[in-house]
Amino acid sequence: MDFEDDMSSINTELRYITVELMKIAEKNGKTFEEVSREYIENVKLLHGKINSLSEQERQSEACKKSLSK
């Protein structure tokens, strides 16, 4: 994949997310801005949890290696 393909794929995903957030906003009687803000906060929370789990796995592996020596 080259840069243009990557950008096209990213734009496609963003359009999909935007449409889905608009549907959620309409269904729940909220503004797009409110729903998108909540979505971004959830993404940040998920990202933090993934990073935390990854760090725990690295620490666990390091501990196992030091115990096996």
Image (tube, rainbow, N blue to C red):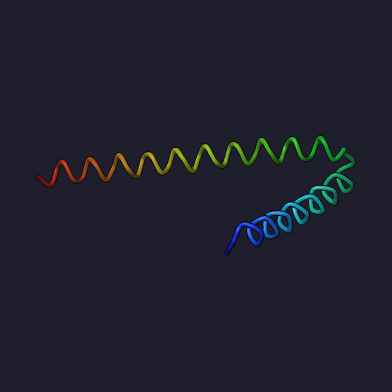
**Residue 28 occupies quadrant:** top right
Residue positioned most to the bottom: 1
**Residue 52 occupies quadrant:** top left
The residue sitting at 82% across, 53% down in the picture is: 19
Indicate left or right for 12 with 1 as reference: right
Above or below for 66 versus 3 = above
The picture places residue 8, in percent across and down from the top left corner, at: 70, 59
Give the position of the C terminus as an image quadrant. Answer: top left
Above or below for 45 versus 21 = above
Seen from the viewer's position, the closer of residues 27 and 1 is 1
The residue sitting at 38% across, 39% down in the picture is: 55
Seen from the viewer's position, the closer of residues 6 and 36 is 6
**Residue 45 occupies quadrant:** top right
In this rendering, the count of numbered labels is 0
The picture places residue 36, in percent across and down from the top left corner, at: 77, 40
The residue sitting at 85% across, 48% down in the picture is: 22
Give the position of the N terminus as an image quadrant. Answer: bottom right
The residue sitting at 36% across, 40% down in the picture is: 56
Indicate left or right for 18 with 49 as reference: right
Seen from the viewer's position, the closer of residues 23 and 7 is 7
Residue positioned most to the left: 69
The picture places residue 6, in percent across and down from the top left corner, at: 63, 58
Indicate left or right for 66 with 30 as reference: left
